Amino acid sequence: MKVLWNKFKRTNLSTRLVYITSFLIFLVSYIIFIINALRLEGIETTIRIIVLVVLGLILLLYGFIDLLLLLRKKRFTVYFSSLFVILISAGCIIGSMTINRILGSMDSLSKDTVIYTTNLIALNSTEFVNDGTFITGIIDNDTDVEGYILPYELINKEKLNLKIEKYSNYFEMLEDLYSGKINGMFVSSNYTITYSVYDGYANIKEETKVLKEYSKEMKNQDYIENFASVTDPFTILVMGVDSTADTLKKASSFNGDTLMMISFNPHTLNATVFSIPRDTYVPIACLNGDSSKINSSGAYGTKCVINTVQSLTGISIDYYVKVDFQGVVDLVNAVGGIDVDVEVPSVKSFLAKHNNQLCESDSHRNMVNLVCMDTGYQHLNGEQALAYARNRHGYLDGDFARNRHQQVVVEGIAKNIKNISSVNDFYTILDTIAPNIDTNMQTKEMLSLYGVAKTALQSNNGTLINVEKTRLTGYDLTMYVNNLRSNVYTFQYYPQSLQEIVDAMNVTLGKKKANMITEFSFSANKEYKVPIIGERYYSVERNETVPNFAGQTQSQVKAWCDQRSITMYVNYVHEGDELYDSTLTEGTVVGQNVIKGKLVKDINSITINVVTHYNPDATTSVTTTESTTTESTTTGATTPAEEPIEE
């Protein structure tokens, strides 16, 4: 060994340095590459092992053979082989950097922290005073970051002297702001988008101003940890986020206008897609079970939306993905646009208004610079694809048309993603969507999807997934919604339709056996269409709402109540009372205690205010004209209130 060492020291110094330097560079780059290659868990395991073994053998052979060449003073051979090794080392370093960049972009898709922002807003005519008289509404929920936690931090930080009024929901607070009962209220910075879609607040952006704003980067309160594996059947909820923030890192509350629940089985490559109409009337999980339109759940954050959908379907959601408008635009552009057969709008007035084109506001809700496109098969860019996915006013079936188009856009994106042929294209897509996507799917699960995608591409002639489409059917109903504090349009779904969809999703998940079709018929003269799950219409009793009884007679209301087994009470309105009207006939209804639009199934009794021209100060006996009940009074007697009327 000593002889070998002495012989090594007698070799040419420059050649010796080249050999040692090249070997160390190769060794370090190889170790770094091993570490990064092992992070690609689930991706081409066999190929990765082969590459690592080959590189390891090259390292050993170089170390041994070039040492012999060095000792034999083969200088130029050592230089040439060292150059070859340096090139391999460069490849290892580039490979490591590539892996790091890809995994880093994937990691950024899951937002560990979020910038939360609260606004103290007021009507434009209101001036802020810090003297203890400024009445301010705050949500009564100590877990609400933007409605409770940050407002109190702001109050303490700026030593604001406010008179606080607590509310159970934002709509009640907003109603009191507009009516003047409070001077201001704390709300998420996304409030203009959240509430402008509701009647009465369409111009909230122009009618209100921000008095105070406070932001803080905090741990993502909406993150939901998941322990499912994408190699087993799983569910994912896709939420389209309409936000004023430029990235999802700055967004918390949102409009849940797009809710797409997908069940996927990686073993069978089957997926069932359930687009939930935004106006579907369901119990909202974070409102103590109080029902409302499902899109309103977004105002309370991701957890509220997920828990609401889980309660609706009875199916656990493993993963969620939030995508904002700009994210859709950028993703479509990143994949080179998509090919779509744009459906012809069915609302004639819409076509006439937009010169027979389909038009919609842009990704920033700008109605001045409309995004328009012709109908028919064509190539759409990002803004056009988003406009097509959002438009519902041009179609008679409104939200259902929008759900159809959203599924078409998703399919178009998926089709083009599989055509990615270069690492740079992949970089572009990841870097583009990272700021505009939030998910609880970790990098490990994303990498596992590679195997699923590979299997899909190798089977079914390159068709990625067998997609089963669904449609939740029901009927329209304008009703009074408690948390929205007004009569609004809702979609009342048929329970049988929902159950059919849920059953299909459970079949996909392997939790339920499919019903085998034993009979099949078709007509050669009629085009066959694949049946859409849940699309059948059902003959079920529909919900009914309480009408406005004003102007009807007491007996008419009594008949209505009797038909529905509702107990009716009467308050008689005399001369001098606020509701009294001398021009009305005896027994005319002028008010009621149950708000118009309330669901009939939710009430057991109703009290009506009825005009009577009987003077309680006179000694007389009067029999009511619309009831068999006789009311006897004497001087100074008072008319009984809330007395049940019975035949």
Image (cartoon, rainbow, N blue to C red):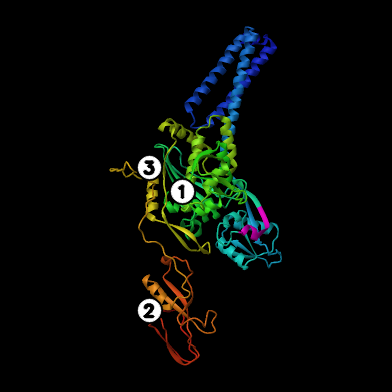
Residue beneath disc 1: 275
Q: Residue at x 57, y 32 (%)?
A: 425
> Residue 172: percent from the left, percent from the top?
56, 64
* Mark 3 closeness class: few <14, some 14–19, many ≥20 residues within 10 Å: some
Q: Earlier in the sequence, mark 2 or mark 3?
A: 3
Q: Earlier in the sequence, mark 1 or mark 3?
A: 1
415, 44: nearer the viewer: 415
156, 91: nearer the viewer: 91
Residue beneath disc 3: 510
- Relative placement, left or right, of 279 versus 90 is left
The mark lying in front, picked from 1 and 3, is 1
Q: Quick one: SS at disc 1?
A: strand
- Give, as a three-letter code, the residue at label 3: Gly
- Give, as a three-letter code, the residue at label 2: Glu
Q: Is residue 209 magenta?
A: yes
**Which residue range is magenta in the image?**
203-214
Residue beneath disc 2: 646
* Mark 1 closeness class: few <14, some 14–19, many ≥20 residues within 10 Å: many
- Relative placement, left or right, of 203 versus 531 is right
Q: Against 632, is 515 above or below? A: above
Q: Residue at x 62, y 23 (%)?
A: 90
| The C terminus: image quadrant | bottom left
> Residue 576: percent from the left, percent from the top?
54, 84
In three-dimensional space, the C-alpha distance between marks 1 and 2, rounded to whole angstroms, equals 48 Å
Q: Is residue 539 magenta?
A: no
Look at the numbered discs 1 and 3 and tell me whether their residues touch, using CB distance below 8 Å.
no
